[in-house]
Image (cartoon, rainbow, N blue to C red):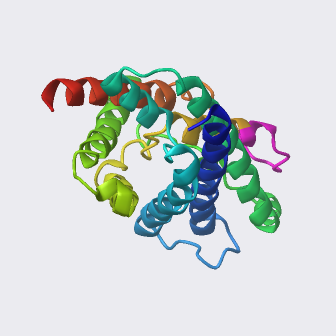
Amino acid sequence: MSNGDVFVGEIIGTAILILFGTGVVAAVVLNYSKAKDSGWVVITFGWGFGVLAGAYTAAPLSGGHLNPAVTVGIAFDTGDWDQVPVYIAGQMVGAFLGAILCWLVYFAQFQANAEEEIAQPTLGIFSTTPAIRNPVANLVTEIIATMALVLPILAFGLTKGLGESGTAILIVSFLVVGIGLSLGGPTGYAINPARDLGPRIAHALLPIPNKGTSDWSYAWIPVVGPLIGGALAGIVFNAAF
C-alpha cells in the first residue's frame, strides 16, 4: 500500500467512523432529536456500526486501522514502523473532518440547545469525559480497554481466511460494541487517540453556541492511555503467539 493510499484511506474511513460515532451520541443527548434518551446500548451499537462502515470503506486502500492504538500495536508486533506516521496523520485528519460532518448534520439541534434556559454541555458528543475524574484510574481503564481491543484484532490475523473474507471487520465491530457495553462506563471508552483528540479540536474550533469547555486538562488521558494499551498489546502478542 502506497503512502498516498494509506493517507486517503485512513482519512475517509476515520471520518465515517467519527460521523457515525459522534452522530449517535448527538442523536441520544441533544434535545429535539428523534432519538433523544434512547440510551447507552444505542450509543455502543452506533459506534460499532461506525467501525463497520469506516473499516470496510478504508480496507482496500489502507487496511482500515482507523486508530493510532491499532497502528502502534501492529508496529510493535511486526517491527515495521515505516508508515506509522502516515496512518496516524490520516486518522487525525479524518477524525477532525468526521466531527465537523456531525456538527453539520445536527446543526439545527445544536442551535436549539443553545436557546434552552440551561444549555447542555456539548463536549460529550465529540469526546470522552470520565464518570469519576480520577486520572490514575481513568488512565488504567483506557489502557486495559485498548488492550482488550488490540489483542483480539492481532489474534484475528492468525485465523486463515478471516481477513480475505472480510469477516474480521465485522467481528471487530462487535468487539467494539462489547467493549462499550462492558468497559465503557468509567471513561466513555475512547480506546482511540484520534477518535478523542480530533473531535475535541473540532469542538474547540467550531462555532457552537454556549458549547462549554473542551476540557483540555483531561485530554491527554484518552490519547496516552490507548497508545500505551496498543503498545502493550503488540508486545504481549509478539511474545505469546
63, 149: nearer the viewer: 63
- In percent of width and height, residue 34 lies at 64, 79
Extreme bottom residue here? 34
Height in image: 31 above or below 193? below
- In percent of width and height, residue 133 lies at 44, 33
The secondary structure making up most of the magenta span is: loop
21, 220: nearer the viewer: 21
Q: Is residue 162 magenta?
A: no
Horizontal arrangement in the rendering, residue 97 relative to residue 47 (left or right): right
- Quadrant in which the C terminus is drawn: top left
Q: Residue at x 29, y 57 (%)?
A: 162
- In percent of width and height, residue 140 lies at 32, 29
Height in image: 209 above or below 96? below
Q: Residue at x 34, y 29 (%)?
A: 229
- Quadrant in which the N terminus is drawn: top right
Q: Residue at x 50, y 73 (%)?
A: 38
Residue 158 appears in which quarter of the rendering?
A: top left
Q: Is residue 203 visible?
A: yes
- In percent of width and height, residue 54 lies at 55, 56
Horizontal arrangement in the rendering, residue 176 relative to residue 4 (left or right): left
Q: Residue at x 58, y 24 (%)?
A: 85
Q: Which residues are magenta?
A: 202-212
Horizontal arrangement in the rendering, residue 156 relative to residue 213 (left or right): left
Extreme left residue here? 240
Height in image: 225 above or below 187? above
Horizontal arrangement in the rendering, residue 60 relative to residue 131 (left or right): right
